[in-house]
Image: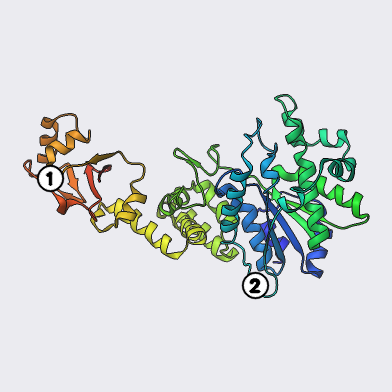
Amino acid sequence: MDLLQELEWRGLINQVTDKEGLQKLLNEEKVTLYSGFDPTADSLHIGHLLPILTLRRFQLAGHRPIALVGGATGLIGDPSGKKSERTLNAKETVQQWSERIKEQLSRFLDFDAKENPAKIANNYDWIGSLDVITFLRDVGKNFGLNYMLAKESVQSRIETGLSFTEFSYMILQSLDFLKLYQNEQCRLQIGGSDQWGNITAGLELIRKTEGDAKAFGLTVPLVTKADGTKFGKTESGAIWLDREKTSPYEFYQFWINTDDRDVIKYLKYFTFLSKEEIEELEKQLQKAPEQRAAQKALAEEMTKLVHGEEALKQAIRISEALFSGSVSQLTAEEIEQGFKDVPSFEYKGEEVPLVELLVMAKIVPSKRQAREDITNGAIYINGERIQDVNAVITKENRIEGRFTIIRRGKKKYYLIRYQ
């Protein structure tokens, strides 16, 4: 398969402006392309992965990707796909977030490649110094009001309200495409399906400014889940690419819990496994879905890609320890990851009778219940069953001096933290 054929097989082409023309260009030239990422938070999340990894696919096929950080457009706010006005962030905050996002993008694109090195650009470099008269005369003059009002990103917000600030976002993104076309010979912009209106507006600006210029737009699909819930969201919030916001273990768990109805689609979208490998996993899914081979492959590929081999090993180790109950071999760092969302209690003293600790930590409602649970073998300390009602929790029961893990029954975990 050539590149466009592979993108189609993977389901990664939602819309393309001139498929035949783009196919011809990709066959004949090394193409420069870009996708933009606005710093609306201090980290990208997995909703950004599809365009990022599509840039990577183009680079692996010999083309030159530009990852554009929206240092300027991030100060404005894109109305696309939003039901209400974004909160405007301070300039200093957006600059800090821009630097964080640059670092994250460098994990996925090769900036040191000899033939086609990727590049990071920031649209603040050309928008930040643009005065309003120049903007209105040289750029805004090319945009008809009816043309802008017809765009879906504007139409969807007319009823609920759209400020002039957000209305102008389309013009700024169009200017990005023009500048990259002029300065970097960038011929292709890719983005999410909600970016179609902004991308085609950029193509129109290039046509009006540069004459018979040949540039292209391609959008990747919106990632959906079969159960109707939003992709990339869990009960504890968004799945971030920053390990401080979403630990590698949580990241791994997100992918391994993928619905059978979605897992093959996600393997095609997000991994670099071959067609043959994915088709083999699809066969295994149909034959033995309970083995979850496809989910394991997806979780391993994605965790390794985003966080590295060591983080993947750590995530698997935590998962296995929690499944088996053998938690005593976990490090304090692994406990911090694996037990992030379990109930916890901070204890400041030295030794403490187990019965008292169970009540203090609200693991059981009373000492009578605590003694009953211990006698019945329902209480485990760091994975070891304790049936002595006179047991005392000492420093020897602290993992690296920081944690004691208490399990009640088969699956109810509690974490005791020490100062």
Q: Nearer the viewer, residue 245 or 140?
A: 140
Disc 2 crowd, CA 10 A, few/some/many (<14, 14-19, 20+): few
Q: Residue at x 14, y 45 (%)?
A: 350
Residue 358: give x, y in percent of width and height: 18, 37
Of pointers 1 and 2, the one earlier in the residue sequence:
2
The residue at the far top in this view is 159
Q: Amino acid at mark 1?
A: Glu
Residue position for label 2: 113
Q: Residue at x 26, y 54 (%)?
A: 327
State whether residue 62 is above or below residue 290. below
Residue position for label 1: 351
Residue 1: give x, y in percent of width and height: 69, 66
State whether residue 133 is above or below residue 106. above
Q: Nearer the viewer, residue 129 or 117?
A: 129
| Residue 226 in the figure: left or right of residue 366 | right
The colour scheme applied to this rendered structure is rainbow
What is the number of callouts on the image?
Answer: 2
Q: Residue at x 90, y 51 (%)?
A: 209
State whether residue 283 is above or below residue 42. below
Q: Secondary structure at mark 1?
A: loop
Query: Is residue 158 in sight in this rendering?
Result: yes
Residue 121: give x, y in percent of width and height: 69, 57
Q: In which quadrant of the rendered view does residue 6 lie?
A: bottom right
Which label lies toward us, 1 or 2? 1
| Residue 48 in the figure: left or right of residue 164 | left
Measure the alpha-carbon separation of dots 1 and 2.
58 Å
Q: Amino acid at mark 2?
A: Ala
